[in-house]
Amino acid sequence: MAYWLLKSEPDSWSWQQQKNKGKEGEPWSGVRNYAARNNMRSMKLGDKAFFYHSNIGKEIVGIVEISATSKQDPTTDDPRWDCVEVVAVADLPRPVTLAEIKKDERFNNMDLVKKSRLSVQSVTDEEWDAICSLANE
DNA sequence: GCCAACGTTGGC
DNA sequence: GCCAACGTTGGC
């Protein structure tokens, strides 16, 4: 199973809204960046992803699961753009902030630090575990 | 196919 | 609100 990180500005789509969707899931639409799209195309059913609030909060707040693999983005007719669907799985016990991640050398190579503008990122097993353990402190 | 111009993202 | 980083567009 692979791990990912999805960024969203809470003004346009927040963790609370995602949770309110429950098991129904939500298309992760609107991505117009090839690198991000390619990551979505690599996602498999059951993969897990961190839900990150950019701009407001700048912290990882929850975990989602991929509930539908890549398909045409319903918000455009342009066949270049795909999206997956995600369902909320759990809140993090406490949010993990970008500031903490930047301070911790375990995350020196993390996309969140190195490719801060990429909206769909892959996360290594080590990074995933480290963030989960931070969230439980 | 190159590259300048432009637009967007996102941290500060 | 500013600005750096960087992806995309379009002329040549």
Image (cartoon, coloured by chain):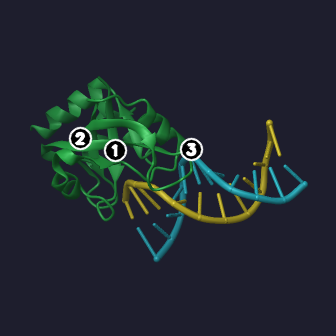
Chain colours: A green, B yellow, C cyan
Same chain, labels 3 and 1:
yes
Q: Nearer the viewer, residue B4 or A85?
A: A85
Q: Quadrant of the N terminus of chain A?
A: top left
Mark 2 vs mark 1, foreground winner is 2
Looking at the rendered structure, the kind of residue marked 1 is Leu
**Residue at horizontal 14%, vertical 40%?**
A135
Q: Residue A89's spot in the image, x, y percent?
A: 16, 40
Q: Secondary structure at mark 2?
A: strand
Tag 2 residue: A64
Q: Earlier in the sequence, mark 3 or mark 1?
A: 1
Q: Which mark is residue A80?
A: 3
Crowd tier of the residue under label 2, counting other residues whose Cα lies within 10 Å: few below 14, some 14–19, many 20 or above: many
Disc 1 sits on a residue from what chain? A
Looking at the rendered structure, the kind of residue marked 2 is Val
Same chain, labels 2 and 1:
yes
Tag 1 residue: A6
Disc 2 sits on a residue from what chain? A
Mark 3 vs mark 2, foreground winner is 3
**Residue at horizontal 33%, vertical 40%?**
A5
In the image, is A68 to the left or to the right of A117? left
Distance from Cα at disc 2 to Cα at disc 1: 9 Å
Mark 3 vs mark 1, foreground winner is 3
Circles 2 and 1, Cβ within 8 Å, touching? The answer is: yes
**Residue at horizontal 38%, vertical 33%?**
A122
Looking at the rendered structure, the kind of residue marked 3 is Arg
**Residue A98 visible somewhere in the drawing:** no
Q: Is residue A110 above or below residue A79?
A: above
Q: Earlier in the sequence, mark 2 or mark 1?
A: 1
Q: Residue A110's spot in the image, x, y percent?
A: 37, 35
Distance from Cα at disc 3 to Cα at disc 2: 25 Å
**Residue A97 visible somewhere in the drawing:** yes
Q: Residue A78's spot in the image, x, y percent?
A: 56, 50
